[in-house]
Amino acid sequence: MPDRVRRVAALVKQNVASILITDAPRAQMRWITITDCVMTRDLKVAKLYYTSIERNLTHQEAGKILSEDKAEIRRRLAKRIVLKYLPDLSFVWDRSVLIEEKLREIKDGKP
């Protein structure tokens, strides 16, 4: 992956995460964490991986919230960063966090 793509992906990840924490349209968004961002080479699509740190907010509910407010998140992102083309955002649940939790439980001897 070219260096510029990595830098823009990190910038998008950082700013979307910040929007969810400090400038979220809904209170439930504060419990959603952006774990990674993968950009296409042309920088027009950003795939953001997320997880929920609140046990009561399932990944389906978090995904629904993110998809419903995607336009608002993108609008707020446009105010924070300047790019020739603001990337289209897609949100994908990060399964790796769940796998890590299960491995930790097995290591600790919990069922």
Image (cartoon, rainbow, N blue to C red):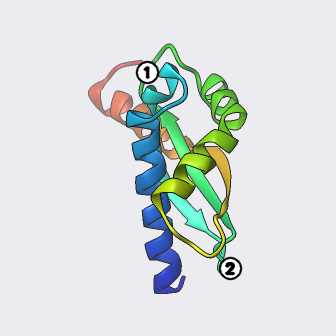
Q: Position of residue 86 (x, y in %)?
A: 64, 65
Image quadrant containing the C terminus:
top left
| CA gap, disc 1 and disc 2 | 34 Å
Determine crowd level at label 2: few under 14, some 14-19, many 20+ residues with C-alpha closer than 10 A.
few
Q: Position of residue 78 (x, y in %)?
A: 56, 57
Image quadrant containing the N terminus:
bottom right
Q: Quadrant of residue 17?
A: top left
Q: Amino acid at mark 2?
A: Asp
Seen in the image, is 44 located left or right of residue 10?
right
Instruction: Find the residue positioned furthest to the bottom.
Output: 2
* Residue drawn at x 34%, y 34% as measured from the top left: 104
- Of callouts 1 and 2, the N-terminal one: 2
* Residue drawn at x 53%, y 19% as measured from the top left: 57
* Residue drawn at x 50%, y 46% as measured from the top left: 96
Front-most of residues 102 and 42: 42
- The residue that mark 1 highlights is 54
Q: Quadrant of residue 47?
A: bottom right
Seen in the image, is 96 located left or right of residue 62?
left
Q: Amino acid at mark 1?
A: Glu
Instruction: Find the residue positioned furthest to the left.
Output: 108
Q: Position of residue 77 (x, y in %)?
A: 53, 53
* Residue drawn at x 51%, y 55% as measured from the top left: 79
Determine crowd level at label 1: few under 14, some 14-19, many 20+ residues with C-alpha closer than 10 A.
few
Q: Quadrant of residue 25?
A: top right
Determine whether 82 is above or below 69 in the image: below
| Secondary structure under the numbered disc 2 in the rendered image | loop
- Disc tally is 2
- The residue that mark 2 highlights is 42
| Secondary structure under the numbered disc 1 in the rendered image | loop
Q: Position of residue 87 (x, y in %)?
A: 65, 63
Instruction: Find the residue positioned furthest to the front.
Output: 79
Seen in the image, is 111 located left or right of residue 37?
left
